[in-house]
């Protein structure tokens, strides 16, 4: 079903259009003087197969931006193209349905597509296997740990057979060790499936660990400040000197941005 | 070689993950059935004992003569005698049949009204506060109208039972729909569930706990309305608990009256416990059950 891609981001070279394109996207909450401009003419491309991390301090509209791409909300101005891509999303919370078993949660993604019951069950088991949770299908979400629940959420997102995966600080609430392992997991799945990922985080090292590019957003309103390519060889380690060094530079830039608001 | 290294790396990951998973899954041991039964029973047993003692003390104080306010020994004797008579079971059966049909009707009405009101905004503005208003209306106040409309029939009782219980049930459903966690709605939306499918697969199941609370409250209202109804609407050849109560007063049969009251109380408590058990089972299934310690 999914040809493993040995080259990362294989789609990029083939001159396909970007998986996601934002053109001068603005989002305003409320109106007039009391209105809040959350995003101000943000333009951003995510190439097919690319892993892009969106980084910013609080109030930079990262989550707003993901909601717009996901179609959960509409931009006030500008255009969003997700060119026929199927978009799946992972939230900061696992957002699993507590009344369903782990397997049935994943099956829900397939049910919406009209897959037969038997096939649903088999495919759900495969997706659980992908996130190393084979055998946990009959459990309920509350019986699992936070990291396991996020993996179920990842499996559910994969089950949607999406090409674009939107992730809104999905590992923010996890302990460091679990997070590191999930980074490896996510990277593996991203490579195997040739996904395009737009990953929101406020953790600079996490962004450098994962991204092909790190896009820094300013706060209130959210604007693209700088676009840092990350060319370090994969697999990377969050605690490696190279990652730390590059994260340090981005952090300095982020601090400058944050300081502007202190006055 | 690199492929080999990749495989080894992946394998190590899988094992680390499995290790973490195992560490984080602490199995909680549930206590045995005997110990659970005991911890559930002793508070009830001591409460009952306390009530019996207080009752006996009031009787001993002699504020009322024994034939007006019978003591626990006499009353329980009458109750035990009744438990051996067929007439008693006929009365309980009639009352319970009414309770179950009335409650079932109330569920049907409450579901339809609740579903419509929670989905259709103008209807909600029009009817929403009316439902809460209906809930505050004492059910006994409906009986004169019910008797005018239906005569001294079972329909009059059913009418009031449904009016008493349906608003609570509808309100439970409406509250459940309102408080569906937004994150689950967003997740459902991302999974491609829209409108009716979103309603069926996300909103309805998410509102189940609140709906159950509505059912429980609805039952309390239904049971009260039913007792009021049976006291007022007495139908020939239909012995019921309410009717027993009525005649016990007419005949100044104090032990009989108290015995019937105990039966009514016990049935109310037992049904309430059933709802409590259902609620507990749901909470356990959903992981809402917070076990301390």
Image: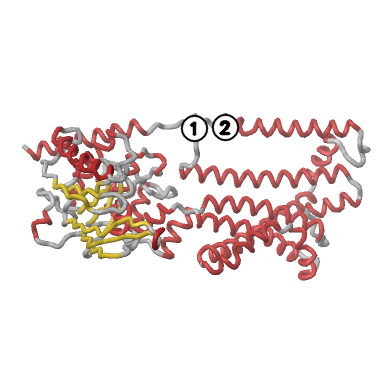
- CA–CA distance in space, label 1 to label 2: 9 Å
For this view, does A229 lie left or right of residue A147? left
Residue A156 visible, this angle: no
Chain of residue at mark 1: B
Closer to the camera in the image, B40 or B162: B162
What is the secondary structure assignment of the residue under circle 1?
loop
Crowd band around label 1 with a 10 angstrom C-alpha radius: few (<14), some (14–19), many (20+): few
Q: Residue furthest front?
A: A263
Q: Mark 2 points at which residue?
A: B36
For this view, does B243 lie left or right of residue A259? right
Chain of residue at mark 2: B
* Place of residue A247 in the rendered image (x, y in percent of width and height, measured from the top left): 19, 39
Closer to the camera in the image, B281 or B170: B170
Give the residue displayed 54% in from the left and 55% down from the top. B175
* Place of residue B130 in the rendered image (x, y in percent of width and height, measured from the top left): 64, 63
Give the residue displayed 57% in from the left and 32% down from the top. B36
What is the secondary structure assignment of the residue under circle 2?
helix
Give the residue displayed 46% in from the left and 45% down from the top. B286
Q: Name the residue under label 1.
A: B30
For this view, does B96 lie left or right of residue A235? right
Give the residue displayed 60% in from the left and 47% down from the top. B275
Residue B182 visible, this angle: yes
* Place of residue A41 in the rendered image (x, y in percent of width and height, measured from the top left): 25, 60
* Place of residue A171 in the rendered image (x, y in percent of width and height, measured from the top left): 30, 42
Sequence-earlier tag: 1 or 2: 1
Closer to the camera in the image, A45 or B26: A45
Q: Are marks 1 and 2 on the same chain?
A: yes
Whether label 1 touches label 2, CB < 8 Å: yes
Q: Quadrant of residue B62?
A: top right
Crowd band around label 2 with a 10 angstrom C-alpha radius: few (<14), some (14–19), many (20+): few
Closer to the camera in the image, B80 or B240: B240
């Amino acid at each position: 079903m999914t040809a493993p891609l040995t080259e990362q981001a294989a789609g990029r070279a083939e001159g396909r259009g970007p998986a996601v394109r934002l053109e001068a996207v603005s989002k305003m909450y409320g109106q007039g003087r009391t209105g809040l401009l959350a995003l101000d003419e943000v333009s951003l491309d995510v190439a097919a197969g690319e892993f892009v991390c969106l980084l910013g301090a609080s109030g930079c509209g990262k989550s707003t931006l993901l909601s717009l791409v996901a179609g959960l909300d509409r931009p006030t101005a500008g255009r969003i193209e997700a060119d026929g891509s199927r978009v799946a999303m992972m939230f900061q919370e696992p957002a699993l349905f507590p009344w369903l078993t782990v397997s049935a949660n994943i099956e829900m993604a397939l049910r919406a597509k009209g897959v037969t019951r038997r096939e649903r069950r088999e495919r759900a088991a495969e997706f659980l296997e992908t996130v190393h949770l084979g055998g946990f299908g009959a459990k309920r979400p509350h019986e699992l740990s936070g990291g396991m629940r996020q993996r179920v959420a990842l499996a559910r997102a994969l089950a949607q057979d999406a090409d674009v995966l939107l992730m809104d600080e999905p590992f923010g609430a996890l302990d460091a060790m679990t997070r590191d392992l999930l980074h490896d997991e996510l990277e593996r799945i991203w490579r195997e499936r040739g996904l395009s990922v737009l990953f929101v985080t406020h953790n600079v090292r996490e962004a450098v660990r994962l991204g092909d590019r790190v896009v820094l957003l300013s706060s209130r309103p959210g604007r693209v400040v700088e676009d840092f390519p990350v060319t370090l060889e994969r697999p990377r380690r969050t605690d490696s000197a190279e990652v730390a060094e590059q994260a340090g530079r981005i952090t300095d830039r982020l601090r400058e941005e944050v300081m502007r608001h202190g006055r | 070689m690199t492929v080999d290294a990749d495989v080894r790396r992946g394998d190590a990951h899988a094992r680390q993950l499995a290790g973490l998973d195992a560490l984080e899954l602490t199995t909680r041991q549930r206590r045995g059935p005997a110990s659970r039964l005991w911890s559930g029973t002793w508070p009830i047993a001591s409460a009952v004992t306390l009530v019996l003692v207080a009752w006996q003390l009031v009787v001993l104080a002699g504020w009322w003569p024994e034939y007006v306010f019978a003591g626990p020994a006499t009353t329980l004797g009458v109750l035990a005698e009744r438990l051996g008579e067929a007439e008693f079971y006929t009365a309980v059966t009639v009352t319970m049949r009414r309770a179950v049909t009335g409650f079932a009707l109330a569920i049907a009405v409450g579901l339809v009204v609740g579903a419509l009101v929670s989905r259709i905004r103008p209807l909600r503005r029009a009817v929403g506060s009316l439902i809460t208003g209906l809930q505050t209306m004492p059910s006994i106040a409906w009986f004169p109208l019910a008797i005018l409309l239906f005569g001294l029939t079972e329909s009059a009782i059913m009418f009031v039972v449904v009016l008493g219980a349906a608003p609570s049930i509808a309100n439970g459903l409406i509250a459940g729909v309102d408080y569906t966690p937004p994150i689950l709605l967003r997740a459902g939306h991302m999974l491609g569930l829209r409108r009716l499918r979103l309603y069926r697969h996300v909103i309805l199941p998410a509102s189940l706990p609140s709906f159950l609370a509505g059912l429980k409250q609805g039952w309390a209202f239904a049971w009260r309305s039913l007792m009021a109804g049976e006291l007022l609407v007495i139908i020939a050849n239909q012995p019921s608990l309410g009717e027993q109560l009525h005649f016990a007063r007419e005949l100044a049969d104090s032990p009989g009256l108290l015995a019937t009251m105990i039966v009514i109380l016990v049935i109310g408590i037992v049904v309430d416990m059933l709802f409590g058990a259902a609620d507990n089972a749901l909470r356990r299934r959903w992981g809402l059950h917070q076990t301390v310690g």
